[in-house]
Image: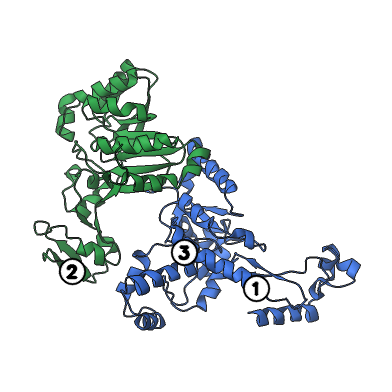
Amino acid sequence: MENLTETTVTIFKIKRFSVHDGPGIRTSIFLKGCPLNCIWCHSPEGIDSDISIWYDRSLCIHCSECVKSCPNNALKLIADPDPFINIERNQCRLAGECVKVCPTGAIQFTGSKVSVSEIMDEVEKDILYYQISGGGITLTGGEPLYQSRFSIKILEACKNKNIHTAIETCLFCDSAIIEKIIDHVDLFIVDMKIYDRDQHIMYTGKSNEIIKENLRYIAESGKSILVRIPLIPNITDTENNKNAIIKFVDSIDSRILIENIRYNALAGNNYKRLDIPFLLTK
Amino acid sequence: MILACEAVEKCHQTHLPSPFLSGVVDDCITNGTDVTAGGARYNLSGIQAIQVANVADSLAVLKKLVFEEKVVGKHAFLDDLRNNFKASETLRQLCINRVPKYGNDIAWVDQLGADCIKYFADRIKNFKNFRGGRYHMGLYTVSAHVPMGQNVGATPDGRFSQTPLADGGMSPMYGRDKLGPTAVLNSVRRIPSHLATNGTLLNMKFLPSFFKNDSDREKFSSLLKAFVALPINHIQFNVVTAQELINAKADPESYRGLTIRVAGYTAYFTELAPDLQDEIIKRTTHGEFN
């Protein structure tokens, strides 16, 4: 068996007392990397599987420690009119000196590589609360099946400890991955964004055929599924789209629950921290 | 401190005997002795330790930044504290952000607080109160963390001079607990509550939106059941938004009915001192995290 202290996975957050991603009190683990590129993505730091740097202007006290520390001269304090640190991303080699010296956490890596056993140490801290509330863990992201080899290890480790497992996924992956993972998952929370294939390609960058196939496969296996529709104004929240998704899911299995998810209006802030454009505003 | 307690108890004995109270406290009547003169069977005096969080956080900062990483020298740091971090905001931010804090389920930090509390409880065992009885420890502030804070200079945890100490007695320093209520409970459970026979107090603040549907209310009830299973004696909750409190402070006339748990008692928010109001507004709010 692979050593769990050596298997590392790239995550961008572990959220304890997670109460809206499955039953009970849960710990959500946010894995980096996603095959889709939804223009409304509310955690853009989760899309790229590689770690980069982000800058939160609201936390910065303009001490310039980062500017002095950078071996590649990628940082500059722009003084006027409202001071901020400019990151020349082409020059950045991710040396991480700025992250080390930043006193406020304004400059941070967008994620970290952690071992499966480190994740389990965090997960196990709240076992009492899972047991009392009927909770457990939720793998989310990014797309947790993007680093599926590691996701399976986490899920296996949880099942060995009798911890309920949920996975929040877009299901855009090879069906072989679903086959491998399915026995370790108690609940699939599936994001269904757009029913129409061409629209799906336009807004997420990928076709949704494989997503539909995977949903059908999981439903046939009898696993619990919750379908979530993120309500993006004028894109996914149209009556046409919602009805098409509901009809499709019903045709697979009418017992599958469908839930609407309100859109997080603050999503744009994370794009600013990463210096990447937020296409939804255009 | 013992001398001050003795002076207070002597005053009570001389100027404020309590015959009515003595009538309902065991053994005072039988002994023919007032409760303030030592007539009670349990002839105890309570002394409260009120800043577990500030002590644990400050010791953690000294351990990390001064002794281990040597980011700042001992004497330089002492000067910065005496100067209330005036020319050292960068250092103060390091103190706040680069060292783990009590309330985040970090065993070694919590243990620093637990060790100090145990030391305090052990030390007061060596003294007898003015009536010849024992002292015992409480871990609650009522609202003393605000006036007491005015007597305490800048602390290594990044707290400015004369600002409030952590509220409650068991609570983390406001704004420093970042991992939600389960992490808070896991930290608090490491403080030896069983030594605090004079009572303990933990404040928690939740957003009203956390209670909007059955599923969320059920999750809150699970949190309460978990608390009962843990070696923690007491929690009290406020369910209110920071904005509501800010509005109430600005416009007291419209919020006369707004009651709030302060620390061991419920009060009308608008009747509290402004600095205590500010401290309550700053307390960490649980319920919706990103």
Element on which disc 3 rests: loop
Answer left or right for B169 relative to A102. Answer: right
Q: Amino acid at mark 2?
A: Ser
Chain represented in green: A
Taking the spot 25% from the left edge, 26% from the top edge, the residue there is A241
Q: Dot 1: within a 10 Å radius of its alpha carbon, few (fewer than 14), some, or many (20 or more) residues?
A: some
Chain identifier, blue in the render = B
In this picture, is A104 found above or below B129? above
Q: Which mark is nearer the camera, 3 or 2? A: 2
Which residue was labeled with disc 3? B173
Which residue is located at x 66 percent, y 79 percent? B2
Which quarter of the rendered picture does the N terminus of chain B lie within?
bottom right
Q: Position of residue A47 (x, y in %)?
A: 21, 43
Query: Residue at label 2?
Result: A69
Residue type marked 1? Ile
Determine whether label 3 and label 2 are within 8 Å by CB. Answer: no
Q: Quadrant of residue A43?
A: top left
